Image: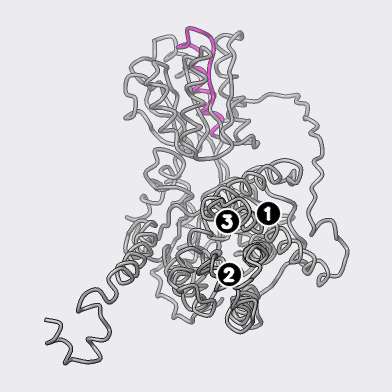
């Protein structure tokens, strides 16, 4: 087990015009490990703990452990399904002394939890999702899940009796097996009442996307659906929107009846308190934890919300009778025989895949060149628009960034998508030999070195060469540069292309050293932090290095602040904003008043004259 805390949980420097490549650097500092109680258990949530849904259900289960003697519970919310969750797990182990961790979100499992299982073989990890496979996965990993399709079947029974239009609506996040099972279970329950009932499904594409969830709910009601249910992380928006349109609702994950008391029929809920108590009891007793745990209504893993006031007597009778059958055990929602679908094979293409079988050094070099070329061409276009069409570079660069993000998402979710990436669309993962590893003896990848070298080379170019001198003149006063006979156009285009090349190189490092594949997480607002870094560094490439480390350290502290001080994860953003305001304030008032005039501090005799 390592005694280092990886400081770059969300990377040190994101991107900036002078030194974008440093954005993927990380720094590790020795820190003593926290003393644990009899057992410290960590819970990680992809969203807020009070979302009336998936995360709240797990948080309620974790809360049931807080009264158990000798158990310390640490929690962190709003952790995305990226390498951020790996840093959170490491932090819980190294700083909080956690010996059992529950990464609760579907996308935490592969590769993130599996990577931590390999790195910390003495720790125990249990993932919610049922994906553990004895033939492929380590024994300190495991999965737990529940047969909540039974609950959706009961939802369907009540919905079938309640619906007048015989049209039901289902708002779903992603077409993964568990979601499809819930959709089919809901419809089968309804068709046990009336075989003519239909169910319209709309996929939002994300586990939590309030705007699309509201749009989907409205669209279903517009098409005649009068009972709505869902499978998204937080059903709150769906429930409130449907009830507001006069439709009835069936809940999911947790009890949403307080959101729509008159329109809420019932809901399929998780009962994770029982599951977590089972795991903790084994942990404290020293008994090996089970690797694969499943259960349904009869096992207490799933429960139903109380029936609402709008549920009629026939619905109540069939609901109670079906629930009684399920509680006996052996009830099958899906009955065979079944035929499997044959999906078309999607051909994934990327440089790392296209060069499969080539020496790793050639592949990594090719990826680096491709990243620099793509970034240079893209941002070089911003410089060209600035010089030849007088388009403001700030506006054009932001617009070009949005276009790039949309284009990347289209490729990742379309022709380059790995068919196995059901939950989070991504390209095929790079082979280990094509990944950029850590600096020997450190928990920092080689991107740190690349970033520092890029900053040094940028400083030499700008401060020690005639091209840099000419660029500074052109940047300060275009007309003066033109009078001096400088080629302003090529200077602007060339230096913006160079900045874009650095950004492209940073993106390549993010894929090859951190993510392992291209996905939507690459567009994580890095450029906005890069603006702050460039401002604080006064556009000095050398100053970018310490400023990036400072902001990276603040960013990395977010999870620890959340767990130790019970503050929201947005505290880090507030702190960064405060730093920016203080620097901006000092810039504004520098030299204007006595307290901000450095000459007055150097010569006290000027105080008298100034007053």
- Front in this rendered view, residue 210 or 408: 408
Q: Position of residue 12 (x, y in %)?
A: 52, 69
Q: What residue is shown with label 2?
A: 483
Q: Main secondary structure of the magenta part?
A: helix
Verify whether residue 163 appears in magenta.
Answer: yes
Q: What residue is shown with label 3?
A: 82
Q: Position of residue 35 (x, y in %)?
A: 40, 75
What's the CA distance linking mark 1 and mark 3? 11 Å
Q: Position of residue 544 (x, y in %)?
A: 51, 75
> Where 527 sits versus 12, above or below?
above
Residue name at image x 56 percent, y 23 percent: 186
Residue name at image x 56 percent, y 19 percent: 189
Q: Nearer the viewer, mark 2 or mark 3?
A: 2
Indicate the secondary structure of the residue bearing disc 2: helix
The answer to whether marks 1 and 3 mark residues whose Cβ atoms lie closer than 8 Å is no
Rate crowding at label 1 as few (under 14), some (14 to 19) or many (20 or more) other CA atoms within 10 Å.
many
Q: Earlier in the sequence, mark 2 or mark 3?
A: 3
What colour scheme has been applied to the protein in the rendered image?
A: one colour
Q: Which residues are magenta?
A: 148-170
Q: What residue is shown with label 1?
A: 518
What's the CA distance linking mark 2 and mark 1? 46 Å
């Amino acid at each position: 087990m390592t005694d280092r805390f990886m400081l770059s949980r969300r990377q040190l420097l994101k991107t900036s015009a002078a030194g974008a490549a440093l954005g993927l650097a990380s720094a590790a500092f020795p820190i003593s490990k926290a003393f644990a109680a009899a057992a410290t258990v960590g819970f990680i949530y992809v969203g807020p703990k009070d979302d009336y849904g998936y995360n709240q259900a797990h948080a309620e289960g974790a809360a049931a452990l807080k009264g158990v003697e000798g158990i310390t519970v640490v929690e962190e919310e709003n952790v995305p399904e990226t390498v951020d969750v790996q840093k959170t797990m490491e932090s819980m182990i190294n700083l909080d002394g956690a010996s059992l961790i529950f990464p609760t979100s579907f996308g935490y499992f592969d590769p993130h939890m599996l990577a931590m299982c390999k790195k910390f073989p003495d720790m125990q990890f249990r993932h919610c999702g049922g994906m553990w496979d004895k033939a492929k996965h380590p024994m300190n990993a495991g999965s737990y899940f529940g047969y909540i399709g039974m609950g959706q079947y009961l939802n369907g029974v009540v919905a079938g009796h309640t619906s007048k239009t015989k049209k039901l609506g289902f708002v779903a996040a992603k077409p993964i097996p568990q979601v499809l099972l819930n959709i089919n279970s809901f419809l089968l329950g309804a068709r046990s009442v009336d075989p003519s009932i239909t169910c319209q499904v709309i996929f939002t594409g994300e586990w939590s996307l309030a705007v699309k969830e509201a749009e989907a709910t409205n669209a279903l009601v517009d098409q005649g659906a009068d009972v709505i249910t869902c499978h998204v992380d937080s059903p709150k928006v769906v429930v409130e929107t449907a009830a507001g349109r006069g439709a009835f609702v069936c809940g999911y994950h947790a009890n949403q009846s307080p959101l729509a008391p008159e329109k809420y029929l019932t809901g399929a809920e998780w009962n994770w308190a029982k599951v977590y108590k089972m795991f903790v009891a084994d942990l404290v007793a020293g008994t090996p934890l089970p690797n694969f745990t499943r259960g349904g209504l009869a096992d207490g893993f799933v429960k139903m919300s109380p029936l609402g006031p709008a549920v009629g007597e026939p619905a109540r009778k069939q609901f109670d009778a079906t629930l009684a059958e399920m509680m006996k055990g052996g009830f099958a929602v899906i009955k065979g025989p079944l035929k499997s679908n044959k999906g078309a094979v999607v051909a994934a293409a990327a440089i790392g895949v296209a060069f499969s079988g080539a020496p790793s050094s050639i592949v990594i070099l090719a990826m680096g060149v491709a990243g620099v070329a793509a970034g240079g061409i893209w941002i070089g276009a911003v410089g060209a628009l600035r010089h030849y069409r007088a388009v403001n570079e700030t506006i054009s660069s932001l617009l070009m960034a949005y276009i790039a993000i949309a284009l990347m998402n289209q490729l990742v979710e379309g022709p380059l998508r790995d068919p196995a990436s059901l939950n989070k669309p991504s390209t095929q993962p790079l082979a280990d030999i094509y990944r950029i590893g850590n600096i020997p003896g450190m928990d920092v990848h080689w991107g740190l070195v690349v970033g520092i070298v890029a900053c040094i080379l940028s400083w030499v170019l700008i401060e020690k060469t005639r091209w840099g001198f000419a660029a500074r003149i052109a940047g300060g006063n275009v007309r003066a540069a033109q009078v001096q006979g400088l080629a302003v156009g090529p200077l602007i285009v060339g230096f913006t292309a160079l900045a874009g090349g650095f950004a492209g190189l940073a993106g390549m490092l993010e894929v090859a050293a951190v993510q392992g594949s291209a996905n939507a997480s690459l567009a994580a607002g890095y450029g906005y932090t890069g603006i702050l870094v460039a401002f604080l560094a006064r556009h000095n490439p050398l100053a970018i290095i310490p400023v990036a480390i400072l902001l990276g350290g603040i960013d990395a502290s977010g999870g620890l602040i959340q767990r130790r001080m019970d503050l929201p994860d947005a505290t880090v953003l507030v702190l960064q904003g405060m730093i920016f305001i203080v620097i901006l304030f000092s810039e504004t008032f520098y030299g204007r008043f006595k307290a901000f005039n450095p000459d007055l501090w150097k010569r006290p005799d000027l105080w008298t004259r100034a007053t």
